[in-house]
Image (tube, grey):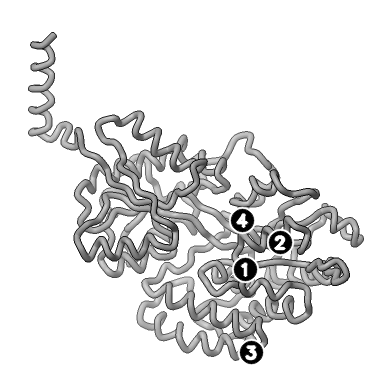
Amino acid sequence: MKQSLKQGLAFATAMFMLGGTAFAGEKIVMWHIFGNATEPSLANIAKWDKTHPDNLIDQKFIPFGQLSQQLIKGIATGDVPDLITIDNPVVASFASQGALEDLTSLVKGSQVIKKENYFTGSWNTTVWNGQQFAVPGEANTLALYYNADMFREKGLDPDKPPRTWAEVKAAAEKLTDPAKNVYGIGFSAIQSEEGTFQWLPFLQQSGGNLKDLTSADSVAALTLWSDFVKNGQASKDVLVKRQFEMTSAFLGGASAMVISGPWELQRMDKDAKFEWRVATLPVRDGKNIEASALGGYVWGIPKGAKNRDLAFKVIEFMSEPDQLKQAWSGGRLPPVATITIENPTNPKAYEVFRKQMEVAKARGPHPAWPQISAAIQTAIQTSLTGRSSPADALQKASAVIKPLLDKNPIEGL
């Protein structure tokens, strides 16, 4: 037995020197944003550890809003992890600063990660300047939740949810009931990335874009939101409450409709005391442009990571169908269009959100996305508070955004 053990150790050492098992015994340091113990991604990390005992993941949870700052600090000091998860709109920002490893050659050589299998929006978030700097992880998008009981009470057919802006305005007006403190519709216009995330689909549906925020089409998108607040069909709380809080208001009966994502499905099942349903986002009349927002995280490897190739093997593992399918159990969707969830919970809601994924558009990608988003948020806030007209608010936003796009022109923005 002892002799056999020695021979085994000698063989392993020889293989290590030859590169056959170059990573044996190496740990993969990962920084991630999976804070909930029920997150499917944590289960996938455990699955990796179980099947790769010689290359365990040394994971560190970093709160969502702090990860970017931690990474910047780590790059400055040379103390970076092997693998990170980051919010998809910041990929271009990090890539343009040389903070991420270029994964182009690794992705091209991968038998698991294939561009043609992914939703267009998800894939676009990971590419900057024609090079691949990340790989899509889990994705999410937006749709319209509505209270079917309230629809019936106001003479609306819950089997026919609003499909256009005109219909959603008419429904919001009918569903608004000041005597009961009920607003027709809820959304998050908060001065953060969440506000940008929720408004961009309306800009895209209107036929507007970031390159021409002063156009009549772009102004129409902000006017829609401003009118909801001005006419009392949406609470002024939309200016200060996050998506989670606006959905809480919907669950509490304070609004008849709310724009939110699949991450709320489990809470709907647990807390809703009424019949709720989900519909695709209504489109602008006459335009019929379907669009939704694209959220989610991506896998990236920081520049200077010690175990770059091993970290990419983890990304490939996490990109396999068995792992990606777990996303739905945590209220997310696989970013791969060729994967469908079999026998999903809330099958009707699943179909709606999956359909929205087909038209979900990336935020950017652009290296100055944080500045672009901040200008959008200011425009939303000043318009919805009545401090300026939608046209004036977008004129000021355009003055900030246009030079950034002129400096780095991006098709589709």
Q: For residue 292, which quarter of the picture? A: bottom right
Q: Residue at x 39, y 58 (%)?
A: 126
Q: Residue at x 38, y 45 (%)?
A: 113
**Amino acid, disc 3:** Arg
**Amino acid, disc 2:** Ala
Q: Nearer the viewer, mark 3 or mark 1?
A: 1
Classify residue 305 as left or right of residue 139.
Answer: left
Marks 3 and 1 in Cβ contact (< 8 Å)? no
Q: Nearer the viewer, mark 3 or mark 2?
A: 2
Residue 135 seen in the figure: no
Marks 1 and 2 in Cβ contact (< 8 Å)? yes
Mark 2 sits on what residue?
249
Going from N to C along the chain, the mark reached first, 3 or 1, is 1
In the rendering, at what x and y percent does residue 257 appear? 75, 62
The answer for how far apart the CA atoms under marks 1 and 2 are is 10 Å
Q: Which mark is residue 241?
A: 1
Q: Residue at x 61, y 59 (%)?
A: 244
Q: What crowding class fits label 2: few (fewer than 14 Cα within 10 Å), some (14-19), or many (20 or more)?
A: many
Q: What crowding class fits label 1: few (fewer than 14 Cα within 10 Å), some (14-19), or many (20 or more)?
A: some
Q: Which mark is residue 387?
A: 3
- Secondary structure found at label 3: loop
